[in-house]
Image (cartoon, rainbow, N blue to C red):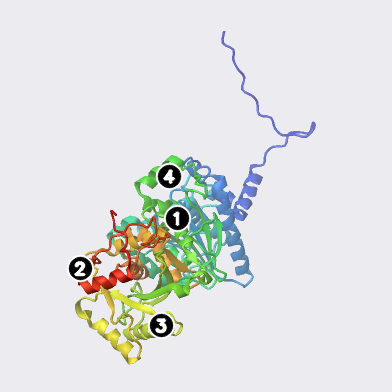
Amino acid sequence: MTTLIQAPTRRRIGFRGDPDIPWDSQAELDLLRDLCRKDFWTFFLYAFGAWTNPRGKRWIEPEVHRPLAEWFQAHVDEWMADRESGRGHQKHLAILMHREVGKTTMITRAGQLWLHLRDPEFSSYTGSEKSELSIKMLRAMKAVMDGTDQDSLWAKLYGNWATSATTWTGKEIVHAGRRNTSRQDPSFGVFAVETSITGAHPDAIFYDDPISYERLITDTNWMKTVNEQVSSLFPTYQSDAIIVWVGTRYGDDDHFGLAFDAERGDGIASLSGMETDSMKIDPNGLWHVYFMAGRDKTGKPTTPKVWNDARLSRYQRRDPTKYAAQIMNDPSISEHNPITREQIEQCAIEPKDVPWPALRYALMTDLALWDGKSRVAKDETVYIVHGYARDGSGDVYIIEGDGSPMWRGEDFKNRLVALCQRYRRMGRKIFRVTGDLSMAGLKGVWANDLANAFNDANEPFPGGKLLEFSRGGQKKIQRIVAAAHFWVDGHVKWVRGAKGVDRLTEQMAKIGQMMVNPKLKDDWADAHSDAFQPELYSPMRRNEPRRSGYDRGATAIRTDGLDPYDYGYDERRQWYDECPRPPLRQGE
Protein backbone atom coordinates (compact mmCIF):
# COMPACT_ATOMS: atom_id res chain seq x y z
CA MET A 1 0.00 0.00 0.00
CA THR A 2 1.32 3.38 -0.99
CA THR A 3 1.64 5.91 1.82
CA LEU A 4 0.94 9.50 0.89
CA ILE A 5 3.34 12.04 2.31
CA GLN A 6 1.74 15.33 3.16
CA ALA A 7 3.72 18.43 2.11
CA PRO A 8 4.75 20.65 5.03
CA THR A 9 2.63 23.75 5.50
CA ARG A 10 4.23 27.20 5.56
CA ARG A 11 3.98 28.87 8.94
CA ARG A 12 3.70 32.62 9.32
CA ILE A 13 5.80 34.50 11.80
CA GLY A 14 3.83 35.50 14.90
CA PHE A 15 4.41 36.65 18.44
CA ARG A 16 3.12 34.52 21.36
CA GLY A 17 -0.44 34.14 20.39
CA ASP A 18 -0.69 37.40 18.46
CA PRO A 19 -2.36 37.26 15.07
CA ASP A 20 -0.06 36.34 12.17
CA ILE A 21 1.76 39.30 10.66
CA PRO A 22 1.57 39.22 6.83
CA TRP A 23 4.76 39.89 4.84
CA ASP A 24 4.77 43.38 3.30
CA SER A 25 6.20 42.87 -0.19
CA GLN A 26 6.15 46.61 -0.87
CA ALA A 27 8.28 47.24 2.20
CA GLU A 28 10.66 44.58 0.94
CA LEU A 29 10.98 46.37 -2.42
CA ASP A 30 11.47 49.72 -0.69
CA LEU A 31 14.21 48.25 1.45
CA LEU A 32 15.92 46.58 -1.51
CA ARG A 33 15.56 49.75 -3.60
CA ASP A 34 17.31 51.82 -0.96
CA LEU A 35 19.94 49.20 -0.24
CA CYS A 36 20.86 48.79 -3.95
CA ARG A 37 21.27 52.54 -4.31
CA LYS A 38 23.62 52.69 -1.31
CA ASP A 39 25.56 49.45 -1.68
CA PHE A 40 27.19 48.50 -5.00
CA TRP A 41 27.61 44.81 -4.15
CA THR A 42 23.89 44.45 -3.47
CA PHE A 43 23.09 46.42 -6.62
CA PHE A 44 25.33 44.16 -8.69
CA LEU A 45 23.73 40.96 -7.39
CA TYR A 46 20.05 41.96 -7.53
CA ALA A 47 19.19 45.25 -9.25
CA PHE A 48 21.64 44.51 -12.06
CA GLY A 49 20.74 40.82 -11.81
CA ALA A 50 24.14 39.14 -11.89
CA TRP A 51 23.35 36.66 -9.09
CA THR A 52 19.89 35.78 -10.34
CA ASN A 53 21.35 35.01 -13.76
CA PRO A 54 22.24 31.28 -13.95
CA ARG A 55 25.37 32.11 -15.94
CA GLY A 56 26.52 34.57 -13.29
CA LYS A 57 26.60 31.88 -10.62
CA ARG A 58 29.16 30.04 -12.70
CA TRP A 59 31.80 32.77 -12.37
CA ILE A 60 30.83 35.00 -9.43
CA GLU A 61 32.93 34.20 -6.36
CA PRO A 62 32.06 36.45 -3.39
CA GLU A 63 35.53 36.17 -1.90
CA VAL A 64 36.92 37.51 -5.20
CA HIS A 65 34.30 39.95 -6.46
CA ARG A 66 32.99 41.46 -3.23
CA PRO A 67 36.37 43.06 -2.34
CA LEU A 68 36.44 44.60 -5.83
CA ALA A 69 32.90 45.96 -5.35
CA GLU A 70 33.83 47.46 -1.98
CA TRP A 71 37.00 49.02 -3.43
CA PHE A 72 35.03 50.55 -6.31
CA GLN A 73 32.34 51.89 -3.98
CA ALA A 74 34.88 53.42 -1.57
CA HIS A 75 36.47 55.44 -4.38
CA VAL A 76 33.11 56.43 -5.87
CA ASP A 77 31.76 57.53 -2.46
CA GLU A 78 34.82 59.67 -1.84
CA TRP A 79 34.73 61.17 -5.33
CA MET A 80 31.00 61.97 -5.19
CA ALA A 81 31.24 63.48 -1.70
CA ASP A 82 34.03 65.81 -2.82
CA ARG A 83 32.08 66.67 -5.95
CA GLU A 84 28.94 67.57 -4.05
CA SER A 85 30.87 69.71 -1.56
CA GLY A 86 32.51 71.76 -4.30
CA ARG A 87 35.93 70.16 -3.81
CA GLY A 88 35.67 68.05 -6.95
CA HIS A 89 38.75 66.50 -8.50
CA GLN A 90 39.50 63.91 -11.14
CA LYS A 91 39.55 60.31 -9.97
CA HIS A 92 41.55 57.71 -11.94
CA LEU A 93 40.71 54.03 -11.38
CA ALA A 94 42.26 51.04 -13.13
CA ILE A 95 40.95 47.49 -12.79
CA LEU A 96 43.53 44.94 -13.93
CA MET A 97 42.19 41.40 -13.74
CA HIS A 98 42.70 38.29 -15.81
CA ARG A 99 40.35 37.13 -18.50
CA GLU A 100 36.87 35.65 -18.05
CA VAL A 101 36.29 36.78 -14.45
CA GLY A 102 33.53 39.31 -15.20
CA LYS A 103 35.43 42.60 -14.80
CA THR A 104 33.60 44.14 -17.79
CA THR A 105 30.20 42.97 -16.53
CA MET A 106 30.83 44.16 -13.00
CA ILE A 107 32.58 47.50 -13.55
CA THR A 108 31.97 48.74 -17.10
CA ARG A 109 28.29 47.74 -17.15
CA ALA A 110 27.00 47.41 -13.58
CA GLY A 111 29.35 50.05 -12.15
CA GLN A 112 28.40 52.56 -14.81
CA LEU A 113 24.68 51.95 -14.28
CA TRP A 114 25.13 52.39 -10.53
CA LEU A 115 26.67 55.82 -11.08
CA HIS A 116 23.59 56.85 -13.10
CA LEU A 117 21.30 55.51 -10.41
CA ARG A 118 23.03 57.68 -7.83
CA ASP A 119 23.07 60.73 -10.13
CA PRO A 120 20.51 60.55 -12.98
CA GLU A 121 21.95 63.74 -14.53
CA PHE A 122 25.19 61.85 -15.13
CA SER A 123 26.88 61.54 -18.54
CA SER A 124 29.27 58.69 -19.29
CA TYR A 125 30.99 57.21 -22.34
CA THR A 126 32.10 53.64 -22.97
CA GLY A 127 35.14 53.07 -25.16
CA SER A 128 36.64 49.89 -26.59
CA GLU A 129 38.74 48.56 -29.46
CA LYS A 130 35.87 48.70 -31.97
CA SER A 131 32.56 50.53 -32.09
CA GLU A 132 30.75 47.20 -32.32
CA LEU A 133 32.10 46.15 -28.93
CA SER A 134 31.18 49.47 -27.30
CA ILE A 135 27.66 49.29 -28.76
CA LYS A 136 27.33 45.73 -27.48
CA MET A 137 28.11 46.89 -23.93
CA LEU A 138 25.61 49.75 -24.23
CA ARG A 139 22.97 47.33 -25.51
CA ALA A 140 23.40 45.19 -22.38
CA MET A 141 22.95 48.25 -20.15
CA LYS A 142 19.86 49.32 -22.08
CA ALA A 143 18.35 45.86 -21.50
CA VAL A 144 18.71 46.38 -17.75
CA MET A 145 17.11 49.84 -17.80
CA ASP A 146 14.16 48.96 -20.04
CA GLY A 147 13.36 45.68 -18.28
CA THR A 148 14.10 43.32 -21.17
CA ASP A 149 16.82 41.69 -19.06
CA GLN A 150 14.63 39.21 -17.18
CA ASP A 151 17.21 38.62 -14.46
CA SER A 152 17.46 42.29 -13.53
CA LEU A 153 15.24 43.97 -10.92
CA TRP A 154 16.04 47.49 -12.17
CA ALA A 155 12.68 48.13 -13.83
CA LYS A 156 10.79 46.72 -10.84
CA LEU A 157 12.76 48.85 -8.38
CA TYR A 158 13.30 52.08 -10.32
CA GLY A 159 10.89 51.92 -13.26
CA ASN A 160 11.46 51.62 -16.99
CA TRP A 161 14.00 54.30 -17.96
CA ALA A 162 13.27 53.84 -21.65
CA THR A 163 9.57 54.75 -21.51
CA SER A 164 10.00 58.51 -21.70
CA ALA A 165 13.61 58.63 -22.84
CA THR A 166 14.34 61.46 -25.26
CA THR A 167 17.03 59.48 -27.11
CA TRP A 168 17.32 55.67 -27.27
CA THR A 169 19.58 54.81 -30.22
CA GLY A 170 22.34 52.31 -30.69
CA LYS A 171 25.19 54.76 -30.04
CA GLU A 172 23.78 57.10 -27.39
CA ILE A 173 20.80 57.43 -25.09
CA VAL A 174 19.24 60.07 -22.87
CA HIS A 175 17.26 58.02 -20.34
CA ALA A 176 14.08 58.90 -18.48
CA GLY A 177 15.97 59.47 -15.23
CA ARG A 178 17.41 62.74 -16.48
CA ARG A 179 15.47 65.90 -15.66
CA ASN A 180 17.94 68.50 -16.92
CA THR A 181 16.89 68.74 -20.56
CA SER A 182 19.30 71.58 -21.31
CA ARG A 183 22.42 69.40 -21.02
CA GLN A 184 23.76 68.45 -24.46
CA ASP A 185 25.89 65.47 -23.40
CA PRO A 186 23.94 62.19 -23.63
CA SER A 187 23.37 60.01 -20.58
CA PHE A 188 25.30 57.18 -22.26
CA GLY A 189 27.56 57.38 -25.30
CA VAL A 190 30.06 55.10 -27.01
CA PHE A 191 33.35 55.51 -28.87
CA ALA A 192 36.18 53.37 -30.21
CA VAL A 193 39.95 53.74 -30.57
CA GLU A 194 39.76 55.29 -34.02
CA THR A 195 36.77 57.53 -33.27
CA SER A 196 36.59 60.62 -31.11
CA ILE A 197 34.19 62.32 -28.72
CA THR A 198 35.14 65.85 -29.68
CA GLY A 199 32.72 68.37 -28.20
CA ALA A 200 31.53 66.04 -25.44
CA HIS A 201 32.48 66.56 -21.81
CA PRO A 202 31.25 63.51 -19.90
CA ASP A 203 31.39 62.99 -16.16
CA ALA A 204 32.90 59.54 -16.64
CA ILE A 205 34.91 57.57 -19.17
CA PHE A 206 34.94 53.76 -19.05
CA TYR A 207 37.77 52.51 -21.28
CA ASP A 208 37.49 48.74 -21.67
CA ASP A 209 40.23 46.65 -23.33
CA PRO A 210 41.12 48.75 -26.40
CA ILE A 211 43.83 46.23 -27.39
CA SER A 212 43.61 42.65 -28.64
CA TYR A 213 46.23 40.23 -29.90
CA GLU A 214 44.32 39.84 -33.14
CA ARG A 215 44.62 43.58 -33.76
CA LEU A 216 48.31 43.63 -32.83
CA ILE A 217 48.97 40.98 -35.49
CA THR A 218 47.29 42.99 -38.25
CA ASP A 219 48.51 46.39 -37.01
CA THR A 220 51.89 46.41 -35.25
CA ASN A 221 51.45 50.10 -34.41
CA TRP A 222 48.16 49.53 -32.59
CA MET A 223 49.60 50.21 -29.12
CA LYS A 224 50.90 53.55 -30.39
CA THR A 225 47.45 54.31 -31.85
CA VAL A 226 45.78 53.53 -28.51
CA ASN A 227 48.26 55.67 -26.56
CA GLU A 228 47.73 58.59 -28.92
CA GLN A 229 43.97 58.33 -28.42
CA VAL A 230 44.40 58.24 -24.66
CA SER A 231 46.29 61.53 -24.93
CA SER A 232 43.57 63.01 -27.14
CA LEU A 233 40.90 62.19 -24.53
CA PHE A 234 42.47 64.35 -21.80
CA PRO A 235 40.85 67.61 -22.98
CA THR A 236 37.40 66.00 -22.93
CA TYR A 237 37.55 65.13 -19.23
CA GLN A 238 35.80 67.49 -16.87
CA SER A 239 37.90 68.82 -14.01
CA ASP A 240 35.94 66.59 -11.62
CA ALA A 241 35.45 63.56 -13.89
CA ILE A 242 36.05 59.92 -13.01
CA ILE A 243 38.17 57.89 -15.45
CA VAL A 244 37.89 54.09 -15.23
CA TRP A 245 40.11 51.71 -17.21
CA VAL A 246 39.21 48.02 -17.30
CA GLY A 247 41.29 45.33 -18.96
CA THR A 248 44.30 43.04 -19.05
CA ARG A 249 47.91 43.62 -20.01
CA TYR A 250 49.47 43.20 -23.47
CA GLY A 251 52.94 44.64 -22.90
CA ASP A 252 54.85 47.15 -20.83
CA ASP A 253 54.20 49.81 -23.47
CA ASP A 254 50.43 49.42 -23.49
CA HIS A 255 48.25 52.23 -22.10
CA PHE A 256 48.39 50.70 -18.62
CA GLY A 257 52.18 50.48 -18.67
CA LEU A 258 52.66 54.07 -19.82
CA ALA A 259 50.12 55.46 -17.34
CA PHE A 260 51.62 53.55 -14.39
CA ASP A 261 55.19 54.62 -15.18
CA ALA A 262 55.98 57.64 -13.01
CA GLU A 263 58.50 58.98 -15.56
CA ARG A 264 56.41 58.57 -18.71
CA GLY A 265 52.92 58.81 -17.19
CA ASP A 266 51.11 59.69 -13.98
CA GLY A 267 52.27 56.91 -11.66
CA ILE A 268 50.38 54.69 -9.21
CA ALA A 269 48.87 56.30 -6.12
CA SER A 270 47.59 53.09 -4.47
CA LEU A 271 47.52 49.37 -5.15
CA SER A 272 44.77 47.01 -3.92
CA GLY A 273 43.63 43.47 -4.57
CA MET A 274 46.90 41.54 -4.69
CA GLU A 275 50.52 42.34 -4.05
CA THR A 276 52.74 42.39 -7.13
CA ASP A 277 56.37 43.21 -7.80
CA SER A 278 55.53 44.53 -11.27
CA MET A 279 54.06 47.82 -9.98
CA LYS A 280 55.59 50.52 -7.84
CA ILE A 281 53.63 53.08 -5.83
CA ASP A 282 54.64 56.69 -6.37
CA PRO A 283 53.93 59.31 -3.66
CA ASN A 284 52.79 61.69 -6.38
CA GLY A 285 50.93 59.02 -8.38
CA LEU A 286 47.48 59.49 -9.84
CA TRP A 287 46.08 56.02 -10.54
CA HIS A 288 44.32 53.84 -7.98
CA VAL A 289 44.83 50.27 -9.19
CA TYR A 290 42.93 47.10 -8.34
CA PHE A 291 45.16 44.21 -9.38
CA MET A 292 44.49 40.49 -9.57
CA ALA A 293 46.38 37.71 -11.33
CA GLY A 294 45.33 34.14 -12.08
CA ARG A 295 47.65 32.82 -9.37
CA ASP A 296 48.77 34.33 -6.10
CA LYS A 297 52.39 34.45 -4.95
CA THR A 298 52.21 30.87 -3.68
CA GLY A 299 50.95 29.63 -7.07
CA LYS A 300 47.40 28.99 -5.88
CA PRO A 301 44.61 29.81 -8.39
CA THR A 302 42.72 32.95 -7.34
CA THR A 303 39.51 32.20 -9.30
CA PRO A 304 39.18 28.40 -9.28
CA LYS A 305 35.59 28.48 -10.58
CA VAL A 306 36.83 29.74 -13.94
CA TRP A 307 40.58 29.13 -13.90
CA ASN A 308 41.44 26.01 -11.95
CA ASP A 309 45.00 24.74 -11.66
CA ALA A 310 44.75 22.30 -14.58
CA ARG A 311 43.37 24.92 -16.98
CA LEU A 312 46.00 27.48 -15.94
CA SER A 313 48.80 24.97 -16.49
CA ARG A 314 47.50 23.99 -19.93
CA TYR A 315 47.24 27.62 -21.02
CA GLN A 316 50.73 28.38 -19.74
CA ARG A 317 52.21 25.48 -21.73
CA ARG A 318 50.32 26.39 -24.89
CA ASP A 319 51.12 30.12 -24.91
CA PRO A 320 53.47 31.36 -22.16
CA THR A 321 53.54 34.92 -23.52
CA LYS A 322 49.76 35.36 -23.42
CA TYR A 323 49.64 33.54 -20.09
CA ALA A 324 52.04 36.07 -18.59
CA ALA A 325 50.13 39.08 -19.92
CA GLN A 326 46.49 37.97 -19.94
CA ILE A 327 46.39 35.70 -16.90
CA MET A 328 49.18 36.94 -14.64
CA ASN A 329 48.91 40.59 -15.78
CA ASP A 330 52.71 40.84 -15.79
CA PRO A 331 54.14 40.62 -19.33
CA SER A 332 57.71 40.46 -18.01
CA ILE A 333 57.33 36.97 -16.48
CA SER A 334 56.85 35.17 -19.80
CA GLU A 335 58.86 31.96 -20.14
CA HIS A 336 60.24 33.48 -23.33
CA ASN A 337 62.15 35.92 -21.14
CA PRO A 338 65.74 34.70 -20.77
CA ILE A 339 65.99 36.69 -17.52
CA THR A 340 63.49 37.54 -14.80
CA ARG A 341 63.10 40.69 -12.74
CA GLU A 342 64.31 38.78 -9.69
CA GLN A 343 67.52 37.79 -11.48
CA ILE A 344 68.02 41.39 -12.60
CA GLU A 345 67.59 42.61 -9.04
CA GLN A 346 70.15 40.06 -7.83
CA CYS A 347 72.73 41.73 -10.09
CA ALA A 348 72.44 45.05 -8.23
CA ILE A 349 75.45 46.34 -6.31
CA GLU A 350 75.96 49.35 -4.06
CA PRO A 351 78.42 52.05 -5.23
CA LYS A 352 80.66 51.41 -2.21
CA ASP A 353 81.09 47.78 -3.32
CA VAL A 354 82.38 48.62 -6.82
CA PRO A 355 86.15 47.95 -7.20
CA TRP A 356 86.73 51.30 -8.92
CA PRO A 357 90.59 51.15 -9.16
CA ALA A 358 90.48 47.62 -10.59
CA LEU A 359 88.23 48.49 -13.55
CA ARG A 360 88.90 49.59 -17.08
CA TYR A 361 86.11 51.40 -18.84
CA ALA A 362 84.43 51.32 -22.25
CA LEU A 363 81.63 53.46 -23.65
CA MET A 364 78.88 51.76 -25.69
CA THR A 365 76.66 53.89 -27.93
CA ASP A 366 73.56 53.44 -30.05
CA LEU A 367 72.88 56.20 -32.58
CA ALA A 368 69.37 57.41 -33.53
CA LEU A 369 69.75 61.18 -33.89
CA TRP A 370 66.62 63.33 -33.90
CA ASP A 371 65.29 64.26 -37.33
CA GLY A 372 63.22 67.20 -36.09
CA LYS A 373 59.94 65.29 -36.44
CA SER A 374 57.61 63.87 -33.78
CA ARG A 375 59.33 62.17 -30.86
CA VAL A 376 56.43 59.71 -30.41
CA ALA A 377 57.78 56.13 -30.75
CA LYS A 378 61.15 57.62 -31.74
CA ASP A 379 64.26 55.54 -31.07
CA GLU A 380 66.69 56.93 -28.52
CA THR A 381 70.33 57.85 -28.89
CA VAL A 382 72.03 56.12 -25.98
CA TYR A 383 75.40 55.75 -24.28
CA ILE A 384 76.28 53.35 -21.45
CA VAL A 385 79.55 53.20 -19.49
CA HIS A 386 80.76 49.69 -18.67
CA GLY A 387 83.56 48.76 -16.29
CA TYR A 388 85.58 45.60 -16.95
CA ALA A 389 87.18 43.80 -14.03
CA ARG A 390 90.91 43.14 -14.39
CA ASP A 391 91.05 40.30 -11.87
CA GLY A 392 90.10 37.55 -14.32
CA SER A 393 86.56 37.23 -12.92
CA GLY A 394 84.91 38.10 -16.25
CA ASP A 395 82.60 40.55 -14.44
CA VAL A 396 81.19 43.63 -16.15
CA TYR A 397 79.91 46.61 -14.16
CA ILE A 398 77.23 48.92 -15.58
CA ILE A 399 78.35 52.29 -14.25
CA GLU A 400 75.97 54.86 -15.75
CA GLY A 401 74.17 55.88 -18.94
CA ASP A 402 71.94 58.42 -20.59
CA GLY A 403 69.74 58.71 -23.65
CA SER A 404 67.18 60.83 -25.44
CA PRO A 405 65.08 60.67 -28.61
CA MET A 406 65.72 64.39 -29.21
CA TRP A 407 69.52 64.65 -29.17
CA ARG A 408 71.11 66.11 -32.27
CA GLY A 409 74.56 65.05 -33.43
CA GLU A 410 76.15 68.08 -31.76
CA ASP A 411 74.44 67.32 -28.44
CA PHE A 412 75.62 63.72 -28.44
CA LYS A 413 79.23 64.57 -29.36
CA ASN A 414 79.46 67.17 -26.60
CA ARG A 415 78.18 64.67 -24.04
CA LEU A 416 80.65 61.98 -25.08
CA VAL A 417 83.61 64.36 -24.96
CA ALA A 418 82.57 65.75 -21.57
CA LEU A 419 82.10 62.21 -20.22
CA CYS A 420 85.60 61.11 -21.28
CA GLN A 421 87.11 64.28 -19.78
CA ARG A 422 85.30 63.67 -16.48
CA TYR A 423 86.49 60.08 -16.27
CA ARG A 424 90.08 61.05 -17.09
CA ARG A 425 90.07 63.64 -14.29
CA MET A 426 88.91 60.91 -11.87
CA GLY A 427 91.73 58.64 -13.03
CA ARG A 428 89.31 56.24 -14.73
CA LYS A 429 90.50 55.97 -18.26
CA ILE A 430 88.03 54.96 -20.98
CA PHE A 431 89.87 52.66 -23.37
CA ARG A 432 87.27 52.28 -26.15
CA VAL A 433 84.12 53.86 -27.60
CA THR A 434 81.88 51.55 -29.62
CA GLY A 435 79.04 51.96 -32.07
CA ASP A 436 77.16 50.20 -34.83
CA LEU A 437 78.78 50.26 -38.25
CA SER A 438 76.95 53.11 -40.02
CA MET A 439 75.31 52.21 -43.28
CA ALA A 440 74.11 54.14 -46.33
CA GLY A 441 74.52 57.91 -46.02
CA LEU A 442 76.25 57.80 -42.61
CA LYS A 443 78.84 55.20 -43.61
CA GLY A 444 82.20 56.38 -42.22
CA VAL A 445 80.91 59.89 -41.63
CA TRP A 446 79.93 59.54 -37.96
CA ALA A 447 83.29 58.03 -36.94
CA ASN A 448 85.17 60.92 -38.57
CA ASP A 449 82.78 63.50 -37.15
CA LEU A 450 83.23 62.11 -33.64
CA ALA A 451 87.04 62.07 -34.02
CA ASN A 452 86.96 65.76 -35.00
CA ALA A 453 84.91 66.58 -31.89
CA PHE A 454 87.53 64.97 -29.62
CA ASN A 455 90.42 66.66 -31.42
CA ASP A 456 88.70 70.05 -31.21
CA ALA A 457 88.45 69.58 -27.43
CA ASN A 458 92.09 68.42 -27.24
CA GLU A 459 90.87 65.19 -25.71
CA PRO A 460 92.54 61.91 -26.76
CA PHE A 461 90.06 59.64 -28.52
CA PRO A 462 89.80 56.36 -26.51
CA GLY A 463 91.47 53.64 -28.52
CA GLY A 464 92.39 56.03 -31.33
CA LYS A 465 89.13 55.61 -33.26
CA LEU A 466 85.51 54.49 -32.95
CA LEU A 467 85.20 50.72 -32.64
CA GLU A 468 82.35 49.89 -35.03
CA PHE A 469 80.72 46.48 -35.13
CA SER A 470 79.26 45.15 -38.35
CA ARG A 471 76.23 43.25 -37.12
CA GLY A 472 75.33 42.06 -40.58
CA GLY A 473 72.65 39.40 -40.59
CA GLN A 474 72.75 38.87 -36.84
CA LYS A 475 69.33 39.70 -35.46
CA LYS A 476 69.17 42.33 -32.75
CA ILE A 477 67.09 40.17 -30.43
CA GLN A 478 69.69 37.39 -30.63
CA ARG A 479 72.43 39.76 -29.47
CA ILE A 480 70.28 40.98 -26.59
CA VAL A 481 69.37 37.43 -25.53
CA ALA A 482 73.07 36.48 -25.60
CA ALA A 483 73.86 39.46 -23.36
CA ALA A 484 71.15 38.36 -20.91
CA HIS A 485 72.98 35.07 -20.35
CA PHE A 486 75.84 36.98 -18.71
CA TRP A 487 73.32 38.47 -16.26
CA VAL A 488 71.88 35.08 -15.40
CA ASP A 489 75.41 33.70 -14.82
CA GLY A 490 76.15 36.53 -12.39
CA HIS A 491 78.83 38.24 -14.50
CA VAL A 492 76.96 41.55 -14.78
CA LYS A 493 76.69 44.02 -11.90
CA TRP A 494 74.66 47.21 -12.15
CA VAL A 495 75.27 50.08 -9.76
CA ARG A 496 72.20 50.85 -7.72
CA GLY A 497 71.05 54.46 -8.06
CA ALA A 498 73.36 55.18 -11.01
CA LYS A 499 72.06 57.48 -13.72
CA GLY A 500 70.08 55.76 -16.47
CA VAL A 501 70.71 52.21 -15.27
CA ASP A 502 67.02 51.69 -14.47
CA ARG A 503 66.21 52.32 -18.14
CA LEU A 504 68.48 49.42 -19.11
CA THR A 505 67.09 47.06 -16.48
CA GLU A 506 63.53 47.77 -17.63
CA GLN A 507 64.39 46.85 -21.22
CA MET A 508 66.24 43.71 -20.16
CA ALA A 509 63.07 42.60 -18.35
CA LYS A 510 61.09 42.95 -21.60
CA ILE A 511 63.14 40.67 -23.85
CA GLY A 512 60.32 38.12 -24.07
CA GLN A 513 57.91 40.85 -25.19
CA MET A 514 60.40 42.05 -27.80
CA MET A 515 60.23 38.63 -29.43
CA VAL A 516 56.50 39.00 -30.14
CA ASN A 517 56.35 42.79 -30.53
CA PRO A 518 59.37 44.18 -32.42
CA LYS A 519 58.03 47.74 -31.95
CA LEU A 520 59.11 47.80 -28.30
CA LYS A 521 61.99 50.12 -27.41
CA ASP A 522 65.31 48.26 -27.19
CA ASP A 523 67.97 50.97 -27.66
CA TRP A 524 69.51 50.56 -24.21
CA ALA A 525 69.59 46.77 -24.39
CA ASP A 526 71.03 46.93 -27.92
CA ALA A 527 73.88 49.24 -26.90
CA HIS A 528 74.57 47.08 -23.84
CA SER A 529 74.89 43.93 -25.96
CA ASP A 530 78.11 45.30 -27.49
CA ALA A 531 79.80 45.02 -24.08
CA PHE A 532 80.41 41.31 -24.68
CA GLN A 533 82.06 41.55 -28.08
CA PRO A 534 85.38 39.64 -28.10
CA GLU A 535 87.27 42.85 -28.90
CA LEU A 536 86.30 44.14 -25.44
CA TYR A 537 85.34 41.31 -23.15
CA SER A 538 87.70 38.85 -21.50
CA PRO A 539 85.98 35.75 -20.14
CA MET A 540 86.54 34.42 -16.67
CA ARG A 541 89.88 32.70 -15.99
CA ARG A 542 90.47 29.92 -13.49
CA ASN A 543 91.84 31.59 -10.40
CA GLU A 544 93.84 28.95 -8.53
CA PRO A 545 97.32 28.84 -6.98
CA ARG A 546 100.08 28.14 -9.54
CA ARG A 547 103.55 26.81 -8.87
CA SER A 548 106.65 28.12 -10.49
CA GLY A 549 108.01 26.14 -13.38
CA TYR A 550 110.96 25.17 -11.19
CA ASP A 551 108.93 23.92 -8.21
CA ARG A 552 108.34 20.25 -7.57
CA GLY A 553 104.86 19.28 -8.66
CA ALA A 554 104.55 22.23 -11.06
CA THR A 555 101.88 21.99 -13.75
CA ALA A 556 103.32 21.05 -17.10
CA ILE A 557 102.87 23.79 -19.69
CA ARG A 558 103.58 24.04 -23.38
CA THR A 559 105.86 26.96 -24.27
CA ASP A 560 105.40 27.42 -27.97
CA GLY A 561 108.19 29.37 -29.66
CA LEU A 562 110.68 29.05 -26.80
CA ASP A 563 112.69 26.05 -27.96
CA PRO A 564 116.34 26.91 -27.17
CA TYR A 565 117.53 25.48 -30.48
CA ASP A 566 115.55 28.14 -32.29
CA TYR A 567 118.26 30.61 -31.24
CA GLY A 568 121.97 30.99 -32.00
CA TYR A 569 124.73 29.47 -29.86
CA ASP A 570 125.63 32.70 -27.99
CA GLU A 571 121.99 33.53 -27.25
CA ARG A 572 121.36 29.97 -26.17
CA ARG A 573 124.45 30.00 -23.91
CA GLN A 574 123.29 33.23 -22.25
CA TRP A 575 119.82 31.82 -21.78
CA TYR A 576 121.22 28.68 -20.10
CA ASP A 577 123.29 30.84 -17.75
CA GLU A 578 120.18 32.82 -16.70
CA CYS A 579 117.85 29.82 -16.62
CA PRO A 580 119.66 26.74 -15.16
CA ARG A 581 116.81 24.50 -16.25
CA PRO A 582 114.00 25.15 -18.73
CA PRO A 583 110.30 25.10 -17.65
CA LEU A 584 108.72 21.73 -17.43
CA ARG A 585 107.13 20.73 -20.69
CA GLN A 586 104.00 18.72 -21.22
CA GLY A 587 104.84 15.04 -21.06
CA GLU A 588 108.11 15.45 -19.09
To which residue does mark 2 refer? 566
Name the residue at 46% across, 65% down. 186
Q: In whole angstroms, how far apart are the C-alphas of marks 2 and 1?
A: 70 Å
395 horizontally vs 1: left or right: left
* Residue 501 spot, x, y in % from top left: 44, 71
Q: In whole angstroms, how far apart are the C-alphas of marks 4 and 2?
A: 71 Å
Amino acid under label 3?
Leu
To which residue does mark 1 refer? 329
**What mark, if any, has residue 506 been given in the picture?**
none
The image shows residue 350, relative to residue 310, as above or below, that is: below
Instruction: Name the element at disc 1.
Output: loop
Amino acid under label 1?
Asn
Contact, CB < 8 Å: mark 4 with mark 2? no
To which residue does mark 4 refer? 312
Q: Considering depth in this image, is 481 or 353 the residue closer to the camera? A: 353
The image shows residue 139, relative to residue 575, as above or below, that is: above
Amino acid under label 2?
Asp
Sequence-earlier tag: 4 or 1: 4
The image shows residue 281, relative to residue 461, as above or below, that is: above
Name the residue at 39% across, 83% down. 420
Name the residue at 35% across, 91% down. 458
To which residue does mark 3 refer? 419
Sequence-earlier tag: 2 or 3: 3
Q: In whole angstroms, how far apart are the C-alphas of marks 2 and 3?
A: 49 Å
Sequence-earlier tag: 2 or 1: 1
Residue 557 falls in image quadrant: bottom left
Sequence-earlier tag: 4 or 3: 4
Name the residue at 63% across, 52% down. 34
